[in-house]
Amino acid sequence: MTAAPTEISAYGDHVLAVEPTGAEPVPDDARHGRPLGLLWTWTSPNMEFATVFIGVLAVGVFGLGFWPAVLAIVLGTALGAVAHAFLGLSGPRFGVPQMVAGRSAFGYWGNALPAGLNALTAGIGWFAVNSVSASYALNTLLGWPVLLCLFIVVVLQVGIAYFGHNFIQSAEKYTFPLLALVFLIASGVILSKSDIGAATGAHAFKGAFLLTAGAAFGYAAGWTPYGSDYTRYLPRTSPRWAVGLWPALGVFLSCVLLETVGAASATIAVPKGLTLTDAFTHALPTWLADLTLLAIAVGGIAANALNIYSGSLSFVATGIRLPAAVRRATVALVFGVAGTLVAWSGLSDSGTKYEDFLLVITYWIGPWLAVVFIDRHLRRNQSDAEVGGLLGDRSFSNWSAPVAMAAGTGLGVWLFSNQSDYTGLVAKHVPGIGDIAFLAGFVIAGVLYLALRTVPGLGPVTAPGAPAPTAEPAGA
């Protein structure tokens, strides 16, 4: 299921064309764009209600004081933004999606674990979350049945993802000024009408600060498995500082702003029975409320275009061989259908389900990041040609990575998970620690990975007689 290099080269920077690539590398003659474009690529998708709701959770659900909530939001988001910046650096180096770049750590087949999880998380999980918020926004704005609004949202975002990389980048660019302007004005009004002094934190949940930091990290870090998906078309000569800086700023500034506004909005009294999006816009003048609801819907679609696209890339990066006619674009359509069904089931009790989802995704992303970071450090003296050659080598294995990731995830959840569906052993007896399963999983996976790499049969191995590494990974 690979596109010929000539086919990818012909795609180039064309916007109104379906991207032919799957998980194979982008050749140099198809590279284009500037790192600055990543600023709006990673700002627009966060200008939506799913971002706002993290702040609402912090004050309105966890009971945290306003300023401690802001601090937790800044800390969690900063960690996620830095990780996101770091991972995107592999795009210009190897020209492959993030989940293909991860094969240097996990091996060709072991990489199916994180790639498969991200395909489900992005293509179905995040798709459902953002579809629900965008649908409720349209429902409040137009008064149409929420199910009809859901299908409208789905058709638009799946259509954008189907066209692929260039169309998505253009869509994020042109929605950026609209979303930024509307949300900045709405944020100013909401902050002026909020009563942040009322959020004293006197009745906060035990561990509310760490729960908030974990949720903020979960949202920002949720983008990390997509990092190089949107940098792999950049020229190899792109400045590394710019490739890392603009995505990090896009994620950090947009998330901190809207999550802070969400925390402030939780201090404004609203009538009972309103939908989440209606409650958020209740304090705004009618004209601004309508624009904000439209922006919430557009922002949800902008976010889900990335989610469906990266979810489909992750699926083809698992190494599963599919018929030649089944390309990345076709997989995007399949994920759209599956995500729609999940979103449909999540139209009720969406707040609690979103809180749990934010925590659950950190459970595997934390351990995954630990393994990837350590592998990058250990390979710091290897050339791009050496590392790139491993990414398409089906004989290359490193089973210590998936084993460490799975163990870190399992032990982190068993001991430190703290959510509505399950409370870990330690969290049950010490609820004040909140939910630090992602942090515990990160540490456990990192330590195990370093230890297991030295065990015969588990460490990095390339089959005898395998082709020598080349500067470009083979088609996936």
Image: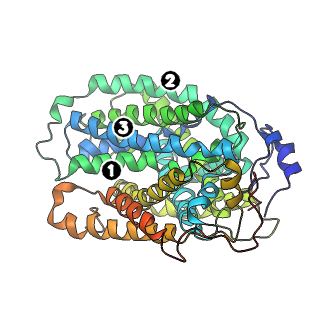
Question: Which three-letter amino acid code belongs to the residue tagged 2?
Answer: Leu
Which element is circle 2 on? helix
Residue 151 vs 281, above or below: the answer is: below
- Look at mark 3 in the image and give the residue it sits on: 259
The quadrant the N terminus occupies is bottom right
Residue under numbered circle 1: 214
Quarter of the picture containing the C terminus is bottom right
Q: Amino acid at mark 3?
A: Glu
Mark 1 in CB contact with mark 2 (< 8 angstroms): no
Q: State the colouring used for the structure image.
A: rainbow
Residue 193 in percent (x, y) is at 27, 25
The residue furthest left is 202
How packed is label 1: few (under 14 Cα within 10 Å), some, or many (20 or more)? many
Residue that badge 2 annotates: 181
Q: Residue 416 at what x, y percent from top left?
A: 27, 63
Q: Of label 1 and label 3, which has the lower sequence position?
A: 1
